[in-house]
Image: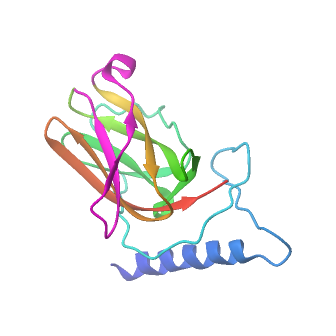
Amino acid sequence: MPRKLAFRHVAVLVLLLGLSAGCGGPSTITPTSSPSPAPITPSPVPACSITIGLPGTTPPGFDPDVLPVGYVDRWFGNDAIWVRLPRDGLLPARPREGNMIGAKFPWWRVLSGQLQASSRRLGSEKRIDADVNTVAQYGPRGFVPSDLVFDGPGCWDITGSLNGRTLSFVAIVVAVT
């Protein structure tokens, strides 16, 4: 891992842990890039090697006006699928039914077809399928949202597949309220 990235990751970890430890009650982090109806209270952040996007890259056919969630930043992709990765590798996930947490997550389809997505905690073989909107709802190419599901915070491998091609990335899922 490049030294600059390792330092930045450690700095984010220290900042989030310091904020979550707080001195006068629970501390919160409020996103500055997009308004949020409620402050975000982070879970502890584990150390893992996150996927870093490429500055200045965009997928073919991308509409620059489409940015459905405020926590994504740099692009990462291949000839079939692209994603905008979470800033600093931190993917905020909110409570779901059954002691699960989840996050709305955007995908960009270069090829036509129905995207499928899943998540897997690093070190585990168990995959959790995501709900992905359909071609009938969003058309055959371009933006399509998903609802990623996790059984808790930690380091997660997230994979999208489309027409036999896959794109995987690693993010740190943090539980927020």
Q: Position of residue 126 (x, y in %)?
A: 30, 58
Q: On the image, which quarter does residue 107 sit in?
A: top left
Residue 74 percent coordinates (x, y) = 41, 53
- Residue 162 against residue 72 in the figure, above or below: above
Residue at (40, 74) in percent of width and height: 48
Magenta span covers which residues?
Answer: 113-140
Expressed as whole percent of the image width and height from the top left, the position of residue 175 reads 58, 59
Residue 11 in view (yes/no): yes
* Camera-nearest residue between 89 and 129: 129
In this rendering, would 34 be left or right of 143? Answer: right
Q: Residue furthest front?
A: 98
Whether 162 is among the magenta residues is no
Considering only vertical position in the picture, is 73 above or below 111?
below
x%, y% of residue 53?
35, 57
Q: Quadrant of the N terminus?
A: bottom left
One can see residue 78 in this view: no
